[in-house]
Amino acid sequence: MGNRWGVALLGLWLGPALAQGGAAGPGSPVVSLEEVRVTADPLAPAEVRATRPVSVLQGQDLQRALDTAIGSTLAGQPGVHSSAFGAAAGRPVIRGQDGARVRVTQDGLDSFDASATSPDHAVAIDPLAARRVEVLRGPATLLYGGAAIGGLVNIGTGRIPPQRLGAPEGGALLTADPGNHGHQSALGVSGGQGGLNWSIGGFERRAGDYRIPGRIDAADPASTAARLPNSRFSGEGGHAGLSWVGDRLTLGLAHGELGSRYGIPTEADVSIRLKQQRTDALAIVERPLPGIARLRATLADGRYRHDEVEGSGQVGTAFRSSGRESRVELTHEPIAQVRGVFGWQGRERTLRVSGDEAYLPGNQERQDALFYVGERALGPTRLEFGWRGEQARLRPDAATGLPGRDFSLQSASAGVSLPLDAAHRIGLNLAMAQRAPAAEELYANGPHAATATLEIGDAALSRERSMNLDLSVRRTTGALRWKAGLYANRFSNYIHGRTTDENGDGIADRVDAANHIENSAAAPGAGEFTRLVYTQAGARFNGLEAELTWQPAGSPWGLRLFGDTARGRIDGEGNAPRMAPTRVGASLDIEHGAWSGFVSAMRVAGQNRIAALETRTDGYTRVDAEIAWRARGGDARGLTLFLQGRNLLNETIRPHTSFVKDRVPQPGRTVMAGLRASF
């Protein structure tokens, strides 16, 4: 089954529609636990009933959490951290899983980038494009395949207006960050008449090398500096979208472009320059056939390129990727009181890599999948179940002589949600999932300067299997609302990069570009690269996540508390690498007349449960705050002026989830001013 399709490019270079904007550090928003709709789930159960490990960030909560990367934007959500490779690159890390196990989608379809192949590759979706961000964990990720076995992050952009619009409405954002020589701006407008709707917008951001509290290298007292060299970044992008919304038929098309350039802090004279073009199409038909309540089809085509540019201006390594994904969902009328969705998903991608550090050969991927999810209500009790079957094919370029691989993958889930009383519900979900090895895990063979590793894949790796159990309890009525969850995830054939120590001297092997060991206990710093070999073993990941909000009716105050902890172990090796430490946080909101603000504090413990040959990480306390004044119009429209501070204690922050934590600290104290407007 092919999913190639023709598209008509609109030829407009405009930015994502943005009805809100802002920026804040992790832990700042008071996330409400109200009933919300999860668009990444075709049955779209309300959180209050589904009792699934799902988070939705939107509205004011999203405005305050916005940061320069998707990972750092979400890093205040329970169970979510960032891979933190400087300011521009940072993918979400969910329950200890990242890279090829965490899928990032835009409006439910692929992000069409190279971010999963390496932590220094940015996600080709700017947070300024988001109108809502959904985070799915555990069994809720079933419908998105093995690439989401660890979690799914879906960025909803609203580029294709899904409903009839009237007079034009929009929003704008302007911020200035003098300390880091930074600014950002965004504008989005949408409207419609007689069923024909449109959406346009744009954004632009710039920042210089950011300030740091002290030393660059955690192990080198002499590396003290005021700024992190080569941490600057810039970006711009845009989109235009159209839709027709009739009584039973909705059709839509959108085209967007994104450009970015950012420095690699681990290499003083190297930067990444990326560009993406993306076209999306949507069709919805209500009651197309007897017994079918709705047909929904989405398609996306993406073209992506990024160049790793040396200080001389020469391109050292170039990535070129093209891909397509399509998805068809049919919602059937209840059968024996079972409501469900069945569908098909197809995805294909071609990747070309060239240059001096082409550690990964060019390859072609293809996946085709069938799936079904259903639910049945038995009084107040709710049963949910699902299945997905997938065929995956991976072919390296013929010139490499490497073998192609084919995988048949099965996933299934079942869950029950029932009330404990009028205010509390408990849910239990069980899921079995399988994942095919990613191209870098199979075929990598060479040095990767950004992470200072020499990566060696294994073309004989087998499919990965996981069994996930998720237990959650929540209260979603009244002024005091909370949710808590326990999870246990068991893997067989868990694929991971293992740092080697061939001579057993307790020092990680450091090698040259030809894979010759150059270091020893006598000369531990010799060798440019740490050797990383992809292998498989059993693994266990367990954790706890909790969140509480308190918002009395009519009160100007709001309180949020949250915390999470996780533990990961690999059979025969001990602790899993880059596991996030325990953390707790609190945020206090206030709104009084035209004035509003928040203050938040998050304590992150040091990480002493480390993998073999890994270094310990110190804990830190991060404090953020904002004060805002709103000049209200006759309705919800108006202008908001704000002053915001991040990391106000000027703490040295080195996320343990980062490959480069010991060489790339996060920004120190930052103060920015800005305005948000809606009209």
Image: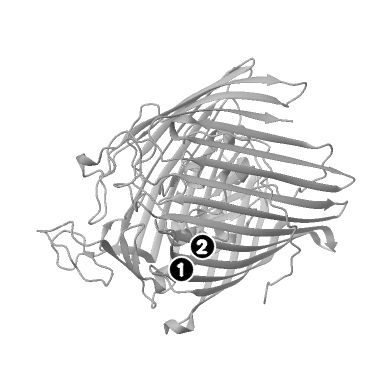
Q: How is the image coloured?
A: one colour
Kindly indicate whether the residue at mark 2 contacts the one at mark 1 (C-beta within 8 angstroms).
yes
Residue 672 coordinates in the image, percent (x, y): 50, 28
Which badge, 1 or 2, comes first in the chain's sequence? 2
Foreground label between 1 and 2? 1
- 600 lies above or below 268: above
Residue 392 coordinates in the image, percent (x, y): 54, 74
Residue 460 quadrant: bottom left
Where is mark 1, residue-wise?
A: 438
> In what element is the residue under mark 1?
loop
- Give the camera-side residue of 275 and 652: 275
Q: Amino acid at mark 2?
A: Ala
Where is mark 2, residue-wise?
A: 147
Residue 448 coordinates in the image, percent (x, y): 35, 63
With 404 as the anchor, is 250 left or right in this view?
right
Q: Amino acid at mark 1?
A: Ala
- 287 lies above or below 582: below
Label 1 Cα crowd, 10 Å radius (few <14 / some 14-19 / many 20+): many
